[in-house]
Amino acid sequence: MKKKIWLSSPHLSGHEMQYIQEAFDENWITSIGKNIDEFEYSLAQYMEMDNHIVALNSATSAIHIALILLGTNSQDEIITSSFSFVASANPIIYCGATPIFIDSEEDTWNMCPIALEQAIKDRISKGKKPKAIIVVHLYGMPAKMDEILKIAEEYEITVIEDAAEALGSSYKGKSCGTFGRFGILSFNGNKIITTSGGGALVCHTQEDKDKAVFLSTQARDPAPHYQHSHIGYNYRMSNIVAGIGRGQMEVLKDRIEARRKMHDFYISLFKDIKGIKVFSEPTDEYYSNHWLSAIIIDPEIAGKTREELRMALLEENIESRPLWKPMHLQPVFSTSPYYETDVSEKLFENGLCLPSGSNLTESDKKRITDVIVDFFSDH
Ligand SMILES: *Cc1c(COP(=O)(O)O)cnc(C)c1O
């Protein structure tokens, strides 16, 4: 069997162990220490913002903390993108609140501003204004932030940006994750950089940051004994894990460049193949990290289906994966309100994510090319 080519696998810099060793040497191996401070600082530098970033044990925890900081409870409705990974929506349920799903638009595959406004009007007419909008930048593609922020402002609804897949992406020159009241980053194993598992909450004030640290470290009141007047969580990133993050930050730029080159590779690979569209930025106001490269197949034109291509790649031990299954189609959210545009269901039906890792070699690319050229040449 040929070596497996993964969709997106961890790609270390080589310096991670050195920072982990430092944590051991100084015996700072829990939830405070230099690795955490430096990791947060370098993220803030990268995103060109003040250091109000809080490193946590996952992006899912970061969304949960953001919702708690907004005071989310069982009376609330929270809007989010239907076309996303389930972790964008689960924390809404952790708070006992109701998720309201919004479908995608064609250009960015992200939250459709028109459906968003319809949803807000409809929810208000039913007697409840949504408390927050969790907008996702899927596959690293920035959402239509001007339109979404304008609507959020008009109806005075707080924005949380799920930039778990979009570290290094920007919209009109501004980093994804810095537009909303809160931003979310993920360092899970398959993301553009990894800490093995981890995430961050991007805040914009010291007050929010302090509250997030407090809540994510068991909400301990200042007292010599253990005193608690709030429910807390054990969500802080450890100083060991943050050491991996420090090593990864040294190469973030290279990783983004490599992922963007994979996107270029697919553009040229599919250039002459009819019925295939490589997912790309709609204009140069959008800058995607191209965390995952994705294509849409029109089976009528291509004469092949998404599943056939996926199986052909799998036969050569090359991983590919259908696009995210929209939340409104998930059994667990079948009764949640949903405002549709018809876009995400088609994306799910005909879309495929292709190997996109920053560590793919020329010979990996050759194997991918051979399968794809062969697959589309025999019809
Ligand atoms: C990966 C991901 C998350 C969750 O990140 P974790 O760090 O694994 O909790 C949330 N939202 C989106 C869009 C993601 O891709």
Image: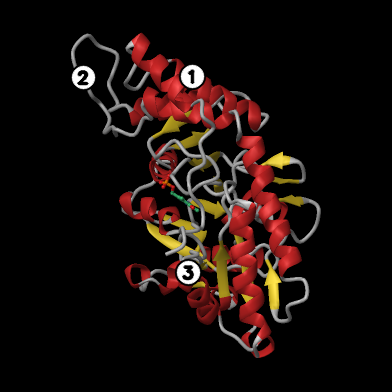
Q: Secondary structure at mark 3?
A: loop
Q: Nearer the viewer, residue 85 or 90?
A: 85
Residue carrying label 2 = 227
For the residues marked 1 and 2, what is the alpha-carbon distance in whole angstroms? 26 Å
What x and y, as percent, mark residue 233?
A: 29, 34
The residue that mark 3 highlights is 326
Please state the total of marks drawn on the protein image: 3
Labels 3 and 2: the sequence-earlier one: 2
Disc 2 Cβ-to-ligand 1 distance below 8 Å = no
What residue lies at 41% left-to-right and 59% top-to-bottom?
Answer: 86
Q: Secondary structure at mark 1?
A: helix
- The answer to whether residue 151 is seen in the rendering is no
Give the residue at mark 1. Answer: 37
- Circle 2: element type: loop
Picture residue at 37% right of the left edge, 25% below the top: 240
Location of the C terminus (image quadrant): bottom right
Front-lying residue, 29 or 45: 29
Quarter of the view holding residue 263: bottom right
Image quadrant holding the N terminus, namely bottom left
Relative to the observer, which residue lies in front, 142 or 181? 142
